[in-house]
Amino acid sequence: MTEKKTMLTVEQALQTLLGVVRPIQDVEEVETLIGNGRVLASAMTSSMDVPPRDNAQMDGYAVRATDCQDGNVLLPISQRIPAGYTGVTLQQNTAARIFTGAFLPDGADAVVMQEQCSVEDSNGQTMVRIRHQPQTGEWIRRKGEDISMGATLLEAGTRLRPQELGLAASVGLAKLTVVRRLRVAIFFTGDELTMPGETLKPGAIYNSNRFLLTALLQNLGCEITDYGNVSDNLADTRKILREAAIRHDLILTSGGVSVGEEDYIRPAVAAEGNISMWQIAMKPGKPLAFGEIRRTDSNLDTAFFLGLPGNPVSSFVTFLLFVRPFLLRLQGVRDINPIRIRVRADFNWSKADKRNEFLRVRMNQNGGLDLFHNQGSGVLTSTVWGDGLVDVAPGCTIQAGDVIDYLPFHALMY
C-alpha cells in the first residue's frame, strides 16, 4: 500500500479522534468569581428579569411625555432619584431628577437628557426647563430588555469566558456547576533530552517541548502531572504508562513514536493497551499516535493516549489542531471549531505539496499576512515571530493578493 493511500487528511484524523471521545461526567460547584475557563455542566437559566425594572438610560429628567409636548416647558423638580434608590409616583406636570441606571418612578414614561434641560429658580422653587418634545419610552431601558425571567442564558458545554461570568453575575448566580478539570499526564522520552540549567553534553538538546506542552495544557485549565524525562527503556516506559493511567484522563507524550530501535513508546503503549499509528497528510506534524491504556484488567476502563511528533513546531501545531479539540470535547464543549479568517496574503508560496501545509505567518499593519522566512519543523522562532497559521490545501500555491484562511494563535491556545 502506498503512503498516499495510508495517510489520513487532517479532517479525517480529527473526526476519527473526536469520534471516540467519552466526555467526562464528574461535575463540581465553583464560585462564579473563579469560573474563568471552566465548562458548564448544565444549562444556566435566569431567575429574574434584567433590568428588573424600567430604568434611565442616561442622566436627565424623568417626565410624563404628554406634559412636554410644546417643546419648551418649565416644570417643578419634585424628587431626586440616584441609582440604587426608588422614587415615589411622579405627579402630573412635575419632573424628577434621575441618574443613569436609576429605576423610573411610576407615572413617568420618558427621560429627557440633561443636555436638553436647564435648571431655573422661580419664586424660590427649583424648576427645570425642558426644551424638547420627548417620545414615550425615550432613553428608557425596559424591564427584561436584556434578559427575561426563565430564559436559558448559556447551554451546557459552554466554556466560560469573562463575559459569560459577568452574565451569570448579572442574574445573581454566585456559584456554577461545571465539569471537573481534566487530568493530564505528560512525559518525554529520549536520553538526549536535557533540562535548562543543566550542562548540555555532546549530542544532547534542551527539552523545549516540556515547557511548550505544559503551558498549552495550563491555558486549557488542565491539572497536569509531569513525569519528566523517561529513559529509553521499554520497562520504564511501561511502568510510567501504568502509573499515569490510574488517575488521568489523558497521557500525552512527544517524540519516540516512530519504529526506530530506540523508540519505545509504540511497543509500551501496545503492551499496556492499544495504539494506532497515524500518518497524517499535513506539514508540519505528519506522525501522530493515538491509543488507550488499561487502568485495570478490563479493557473498558482506560485512559486515552496521544503521542505527538518530537520536532517542536510539529508538536506545537499538532497540539493546536488535534489535542486542543480533543481536550475540549472531553469536557463536553460544544463549539470546538477554530476561528478561520479570510485575509489577504502579502507573500508568494510556490511550493505546492501533496500534504495540507500550515505556514507560520504574522498580520502586518496593512491588514495582510507576512510569511516567516524559514518554515522548518524545528524552527521554533517561527511560532514566536508569528501570530497565526495559514491553512494551505494540498496541491495549492499562494500568490500575493490571494485571500486565504488564517487561523490566529489566540483562538487556538485557549
Image (cartoon, rainbow, N blue to C red):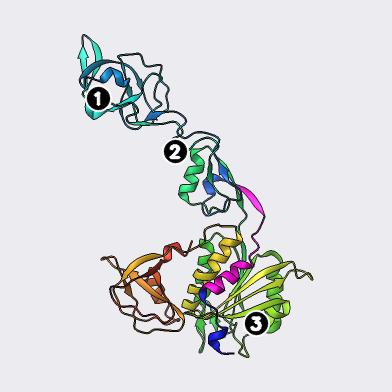
Secondary structure of the residue carrying tag 3 is: helix
Q: Nearer the viewer, residue 355 or 383?
A: 355
Name which residue lies at 28% across and 17% down. Answer: 67
Q: Earlier in the sequence, mark 3 or mark 1?
A: 1
What's the residue type where badge 2 is placed? Asp
Residue 43 in the image: x percent, y percent? 58, 46
What's the residue type where badge 1 is placed? Gln
What residue sits right under mark 2 in the picture?
146
At label 2, counting other C-alpha atoms closer than 10 Å, the crowd grade (few under 14, some 14-19, many 20 or more) is few
Q: Earlier in the sequence, mark 2 or mark 1?
A: 1
**Residue 277 falls in which quadrant of the image?**
bottom right
- Gap in angstroms between the C-alphas marked 2 and 1: 27 Å
Q: Indicate whether residue 21 is drawn in magenta.
A: yes
What residue sits right under mark 1 in the picture?
133
- Horizontal relation, residue 66 to residue 9: left or right: left
Position above or below: 11 against 121: below
- Gap in angstroms between the C-alphas marked 3 and 1: 79 Å
Q: Mark 3 or mark 1: which is in front? A: 1
- Gap in angstroms between the C-alphas marked 3 and 2: 55 Å
Secondary structure of the residue carrying tag 2 is: loop
What residue sits right under mark 3 in the picture?
266
Bounds of the magenta segment: 11-29
Secondary structure of the residue carrying tag 1 is: loop
Residue 123 in the image: x percent, y percent? 21, 8
